[in-house]
Amino acid sequence: GESVGLHLPTLSVQEGDNSIINCAYSNSASDYFIWYKQESGKGPQFIIDIRSNMDKRQGQRVTVLLNKTVKHLSLQIAATQPGDSAVYFCAENPMDSSYKLIFGSGTRLLVRP
Amino acid sequence: DVKVTQSSRYLVKRTGEKVFLECVQDMDHENMFWYRQDPGLGLRLIYFSYDVKMKEKGDIPEGYSVSREKKERFSLILESASTNQTSMYLCASNRGGGLDTQYFGPGTRLTVL
C-alpha cells in the first residue's frame, strides 16, 4: 500500500451491515499479510493475518481474502458494530526480509447507528 | 496476551532537549521496533533491534538513536529534539524468525515546541 495523502479514504456503513475494506499491496514477492485496527489515540491492534499460500482466512466476525494475481487484500467484517469504528490498515512482509513490514495508509471505517 | 507498554502517552518537550522514550514487552520477544506515524505518511520504521545490544537502522534513523540493554526494553532517544520530530511514536515487538505479526504499544504522542 502506498500513502494516499492527508485524507484517508472513508467507508461509512450502517450498524449490522457487512463491511469490506480493501488494500492494494505493492510487492508481488510479499508472502505474509496482516490487518490492523487503530482506534483514535491508540496503537494498532492485530486483527488477522494470512500467508501467501492461502487465499482466505476466517476469524471471529472477520475474513481476509488474498488475491495474489492482482495484489489485492480485503478485510470483511460481518455485522459491523459501533465498536468497529476505527482506521484499518494492511501490512505486507516482503519475502526478502525477515522483519520488515510495509504498511498501507489505511481506511477509516465509520459505523452509523 | 502480548503486552507492549510505553512509558508515556503524551510528552511535551522543548527544542534542543534530549528525549527518552521507553518501551517494554513482556513476551520474551526477540525483535523490537520503533516507528513514527504521521498523517498521510503512515508508519515509518526508525530503528529495529533483533537482540540485546543489536540494532539496525530503519527508513528514517536521522536524529534518533536507540538502546537495548535488556531483552524486554527498547529505548528511543532524540539527542536534540526538533519541531519536525513532533509525531506519534509507536513501539512494537515480535518473536522473530519471519512471518510473524508485530504487536504494538499504545503510542507516545510527542510535541516539540
Image (cartoon, coloured by chain):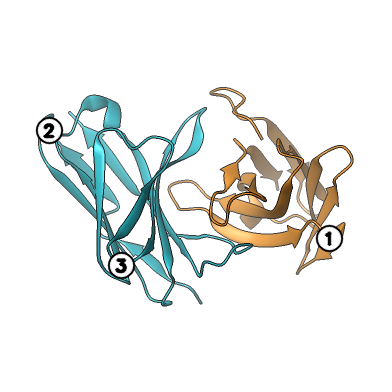
Chain colours: A orange, B cyan
Residue under the point 48% across and 46% down: A40
In the rendered image, which quarter contains the C terminus of chain B?
top left
Camera-side mark, 2 or 3: 3
Total numbered labels: 3
Q: Quick one: SS at disc 2?
A: loop
Q: Residue at x 63, y 44 (%)?
A: A89
Q: Position of residue A52 (x, y in %)?
A: 79, 56
Q: Earlier in the sequence, mark 2 or mark 3?
A: 2
How would you rate the neighbour count of disc 3 (Cα within 10 Å): few for under 14, some for 14-19, many for 20 or more?
A: some
Name which residue type carries label 2.
Arg
Residues at marks 1 and 3, CA–CA distance in whole angstroms: 33 Å
Label 3 sits on a secondary structure element that is: loop
Q: Amino acid at mark 3?
A: Val
Residue A82 seen in this snapshot: no
Camera-side residue of A37 and A80: A37
**What residue would you read off at disc 2?**
B14
Left-right relation of A38 to B89: right
Residue B77 in percent (x, y) is at: 21, 47
- Image position, residue B86 (x, y; %): 29, 32
Q: Chain of mark 2?
A: B
The residue beneath circle 3 is B52
Q: Residues within 10 Å of mark 2 (few under 14, many from 20)?
A: some
Image vertical order of residue A86 relative to residue A50, above or below:
above
Determine the CA span between mark 2 and mark 3: 31 Å
Q: Secondary structure at mark 1?
A: loop
Give residue B101's quadrant in the image. bottom right
**Dot 1 crowding, Cα within 10 Å, few <14, some 14–19, many 20+:** few
Residue type, numbered disc 1: Asn
Instruction: Name the residue carrying label 1.
Output: A53
Give the residue at x 67% y 30%. A9
Residue at the extreme top: A5
